[in-house]
Image (cartoon, grey):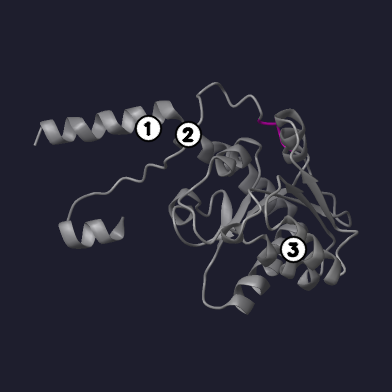
Amino acid sequence: MESVRCFWRRDAYFMSEVGLENSSFPHSVEGGVCHEKGTPLRICWAGEHIPRKALDLLLRALPFCKERMELHVLSKGPRMTAWKKLTRRLGLDDRVTFHGFVEWEEAFRIMGRSHVFCITSVCDATSTVLLEAFSHRLPIIALDHCGFSTAIDDTCGIKIPIRSLSQVIEDYARSLDFLAAHEDVRQRLAAGALERCRHFTWESKMQMLNKIYSNVVQG
């Protein structure tokens, strides 16, 4: 977006390739869940188990966490066996649950009981699961690149800069510890996630397109 403004001196609009129906977000939880100090912070991760989803970044971050963590991994794929082996090698068997493929209702139940959603994808625009996490009032921790850089802001999540592998892993751990220790901030981001979700309904996209076309027509 900044490049468009720089080179063409025109306003740019972010429009993700995915969206939600504007039906008051039926999966959202009124008030969300609370994280009680001293109990594990429940993390949810979902996506196909393939290299570009990079779940191993999150797995490698967990041993650096000072607070208690509990990771719930949804779906499966070719990298599932390797990631399970990494989990055992890191001594995380008691902290990581691989649920595999589950029915939508069960997936949403797991999301609804979580405190935070982590995205580790290194090569995606945005994703439907991001919007589903928003609709469950889940603060997002994701890499600061691709579409996630624009879809996520400081009202609804934490973006991890990319400078080195070790820095990314340490920043995931640091961000998780911060949210585990600051429930007031986590709750603020949770409320912001649900509000942010409203920007990504198909209805809001149509309104944006109508505005763009109207501006073009009016010159």
- Dot 3 falls on a residue whose secondary structure is helix
Q: Quarter-wise, where is residue 68 in the image?
A: bottom right
- Is 113 on the left or on the right of 120, as rendered? right
How far apart, in angstroms, are the residues tagged by discs 1 and 2?
8 Å
Where is mark 3, residue-wise? 82
Circle 1 crowding by C-alpha within 10 Å: few under 14, some 14–19, many from 20: some
The magenta stretch is 28-32
- Dot 1 falls on a residue whose secondary structure is helix
Q: Quarter-wise, where is residue 128 in the image?
A: top right
Q: Position of residue 168 (x, y in %)?
A: 61, 72
Where is mark 2, residue-wise? 19
Residue type of the residue flagged with mark 3? Ala
**Badge 1 or badge 2: first in the primary sequence:** 2
Write the residue at 18% across / 30% down.
Answer: 214
Q: Nearer the viewer, residue 41 or 57?
A: 57
Q: Are marks 2 and 3 in contact (CB under 8 Å)?
A: no
Write the residue at 66% across / 37% down.
Answer: 136
Residue type of the residue flagged with mark 2? Gly
Residue 31 lies in magenta, yes or no? yes
Which numbered tag is attached to residue 60?
A: none
Quarter of the image with the N terminus is bottom left
Where is mark 1, residue-wise? 205
- Is 102 on the left or on the right of 168, as rendered? right
How far apart, in angstroms, are the residues tagged by discs 2 and 3?
32 Å
